[in-house]
Image (tube, helix red, strand yellow):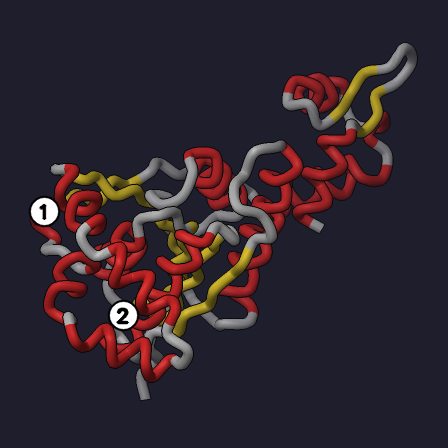
Amino acid sequence: MKNVQKTALVAPLGLSPPIVTAGTDSAGSGISDLTIIATNHPGVLAGLDFIRVAMSIRKPRMKIHPEYLSYKDITTTEDNLAFMKCAIRVIREARDKQGCDRVVLNVAGARKNMSITLALIGQLMNVDGIFHIGNRGIELFNYNLEHIRSDIDRIHQAKTFREKQKIYREKKDLFNHVLFPPKSEYDLVRVPTFPVDQSYVKDLIVRIKEDPDALPLSEKIILERHMILEKGRTHYYLSDYGAGFLDAFI
């Protein structure tokens, strides 16, 4: 029996669920797992609920993996490092636990800092593709979405998943039109990526953690520019930011 290649799609969610669901239509065939990273903002959680219900009806074979952040928005470097740690973990889990052969990232949703951070992490971890969704007209997602906000809240407030599905089916054609617009109405924008030597990345992280001052001067200078290291009078040492950065990978 031929093995079916599994592909994981990882996407942060903002207040526009169609950005995530349209991505499942456009990221190529074989999307088996969808990981959605959501803050605890009420509107984001309602949108996540809406997506889960929609996918259970439209694409019931696709496995949904929600990831919840403990804050409403990323407003500090500490918040962003926490998001970075979450992103690294879910990419690893997609490969190791979900058994996916490929991992692609949809960075079109959520805040810009989340999208940028996710794209950079994806590059460092050699994901198989990163894309953004180009909306040709504001009405495609935003205008249509605003007309069903009350329905999204109603689904979110329903007590059981079966009840949520029942509400969705009442307006299934409308909801599907909003969440899964024709591919001809938007563009999939490939974000440039380039392979990164994973053995070098892992080795560098270990060497920084063990003794940053023992690194070659050229590496110490670069790491200082990136604020991973700080320079004292006689030696280089790991900065607080650098410690948080490395902790996300370990």
Which residue is more in the foreground, 53 or 85?
Answer: 53
Q: Quadrant of residue 170?
A: bottom left
Residue 58 appears in the rendering: no
Residue extending farthest to the top is 233
Residue drawn 54% across the image and 38% down it: 74
Give the number of the mark in front: 1 or 2: 2
Q: In the shown orientation, is residue 28 left or right of residue 156? A: left
SS label for mark 1: helix
Check the image and report above or below for 184 versus 209. Answer: below
Which residue is more in the foreground, 58 or 61?
Answer: 58
Residue drawn 8% across the image and 49% down it: 184
Residue extending farthest to the right is 234
Which residue is more in the foreground, 226 or 146?
Answer: 146
Q: In the shown orientation, is residue 144 left or right of residue 90? A: left
Check the image and report above or below for 105 versus 135. Answer: below
Q: Earlier in the sequence, mark 1 or mark 2?
A: 2
Residue extending farthest to the bottom is 1
Q: What's the residue type where badge 2 is placed?
A: Ala
- Expressed as whole percent of the image width and height from the top left, the position of residue 21 reads 27, 59
Q: Which of the numbered marks, if any, corresponds to residue 88? A: none
Residue drawn 32% across the image and 72% down it: 53
Q: In the shown orientation, is residue 147 left or right of residue 79? A: left
- Expressed as whole percent of the image width and height from the top left, the position of residue 242 reads 72, 32
Q: Which quadrant would the N terminus be assigned to in this image?
A: bottom left
Q: Residues within 10 Å of mark 2 (few under 14, many from 20)?
A: many
Which residue bears the numbered disc 1?
185
Which residue bears the numbered disc 2?
54
Q: Residues within 10 Å of mark 1 (few under 14, many from 20)?
A: few
Check the image and report above or below for 15 versus 204. Answer: below
Q: CA distance from mark 1 to mark 2?
A: 20 Å
- Expressed as whole percent of the image width and height from the top left, the position of residue 249 reads 66, 48
